[in-house]
Amino acid sequence: MDAIKGETLLKVQQLRDQFDNLEKHTQWGIDFVEKYTKFVKERTEIELNYARQIRNLSKKYQPKKKEEDENKYTWCRAFHSTLNELNDYAGQHEVIAENMTSQIIADLTRYTQEIKTERKSHFHDGRKAQQQIEASWKQLESCKRKFERDCKEADRAQQYFEKMDADINVTKADVEKARQQAQMRHQMASDSKNEYSSYLQKFNQEQNEHYYTIIPNIFQKIQAMEEKRIERMGESLKTFAEVDRQILPIIGKCLDGMTQAAESIEPKNDSSQVIESYKSGFEPPGDVEFEDYGQAMKRTVSETSLNNSRSDNKAERSSKGKTKTLWPFIKKNKGSNPEDFSHLPPEQRRKKLQAKIDDINKDIQKEMDQRDALTKMKEVYIKNPQMGDPNSVDPRLGEIAQNIEKLQAEAQKFEGWLAEVEGRMPVKSDPPRRTSVLYETQNSTPPTNNNCAQDRESSPDGSYTEEPSSEVQSKPEVQPEPAESGDEFDDADEEMLPTIGTCKALYPFEGHNEGTIAVAEGELLYVIEEDKGDGWTRVRRNEEEEGYVPTSYVEVFLDSNAKGAITYI
């Protein structure tokens, strides 16, 4: 212990002349702590920005509601799992920023304020001790100069007395006066000497205490403060690494999750899903039969046969004008899709309708569960009136009943469409045969299979409806070509049709296709042509805007004097 004290004392003695340098060094140490704190703070900002960018990236590529069908493919699910793991990965970087803020930044900020206060106190004590020793030194110098001055005055007074005493011409009174003056000066010098000696002894004691007690204690406190600062720096640097090390296992789990998601991909299963999703349900078309145009040349050319031939040719051209493209080459409608999914092939339409019916049945079940719960609550209120008023439940029960009725009506509508689709699905045991229009006209035999895609006709929104192809065969006369719906509005000379009623839009309709008109929910329009069985009603907004809307989208109110006046939804 004595050796340690002696070593410390030696160090203090070596540093006693470096007080100002120590003050600069400790201030530099505090500045370094603040710089390191700023470094960690910038690191946390980088981690937070990185985590935010990773989260935004993950959110950007998350599947939207319209892309929920992607979940049936394993490679899509693997990508979505990777996005979720990446989101957790970003969360770990937020944990890094949070831990560094709480364990390093907050701790060092608080410690910096403490060390500044401590340092200020130590150097204040050191400056005070220096000021005291400097004041004692000045006082000693003052006593020393006074003693020197009094000694010189005593010597001059003594020399003057000796001179006066040796001069015979000087009176005895002057000599006595000079002697008394010399004695007084000698006394003053003696007093100054004693005062100087006393203060010198006092100063030496103070100086010894200053350099061997006060200053060493201050330096020891500064040394301890500096060592503690360095120790805290080491702890912060270690914490800086440990914060990263703590999240490595979790990040490893995130990466393992990404790897497992990638390994869960099943190419064969996905290809089977694609086949199941896009299976149309159409049967392959039959063989194309030979159309023998040479038979007309073998008949005798007469006026009657010529007229019949012309009539047949016109009917043939009319039929050919209505012949539809084979189903593999049918173009998809680019406008809004109809409610009954009639724009889809039979198999896909059946799946869509079945899924819609399932969703409606789920909603009906929810409403029925709420109704049962409210009914039980009402029974409890009836048995225990203090718990509540039974009549307060009736409005909600009525609302639920209306909802169930609407949902059941909608389910019935979709079930009708589903039954229609299932009835029209081609039977594999009876593949359709595709015959020429000329052959059908000559034999006057209507086609037996009206469910193939080539016999379907586009409605105003691009959906497919059944084509009454038998009209061409049953009527050999030349039929006028039907005008396109869009041409009806382009003819400026066409007479404006009278209104036969009004209608109210139940749902919004965008009307992208030619011949249709966009309507908003709740909008009132004039009816100028009722539904003729094709699912479309012709309406007018004003003198310049008219077109077709789906009949199921509006509630029609026909005038009482209109033909077949009915109200339907």
Image (cartoon, rainbow, N blue to C red):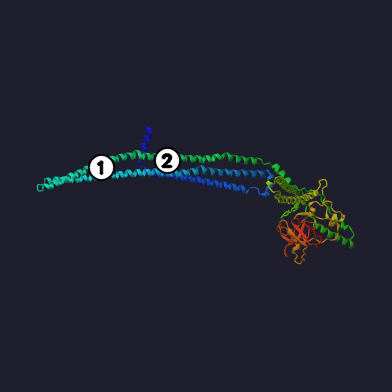
Pointer 1: residues within 10 angstroms few (<14), some, or many (20+)?
A: many
**Residue in the foreground of this view, choosing between 44 and 334:** 44
Q: Earlier in the sequence, mark 2 or mark 1?
A: 1
Q: Dividing the picture into quarters, in which one does residue 494 lie?
A: bottom right
Whole-number angstrom distance, CA of label 2 to CA of label 1: 41 Å
Q: Position of residue 362 (x, y in %)?
A: 72, 47
The kind of secondary structure element at disc 2 is helix
**What residue did someone put label 1 on?**
196
Residue at (27% x, 44% y) in the render: 141
Estimate the x, y position of residue 501 in percent, counting from the top left: 77, 62
Which residue lies under the disc numbered 2?
225
For the C terminus, the image quarter is bottom right
Disc 2 or disc 1, which is closer to the eye? 1
Q: Quadrant of the N terminus?
A: top left
Residue furthest bottom in the image = 493
| Tag 2: amino acid | Met
Task: For mark 1, give the secondary structure.
Answer: helix
Give the residue displayed 42% in from the left and 43% down from the top.
118
**Where, by quadrant of the figure, is residue 150 drawn?**
top left
Residue 14 visible at all? no
Q: Is residue 294 above or below residue 179?
A: below
Q: Position of residue 8 (x, y in %)?
A: 37, 36
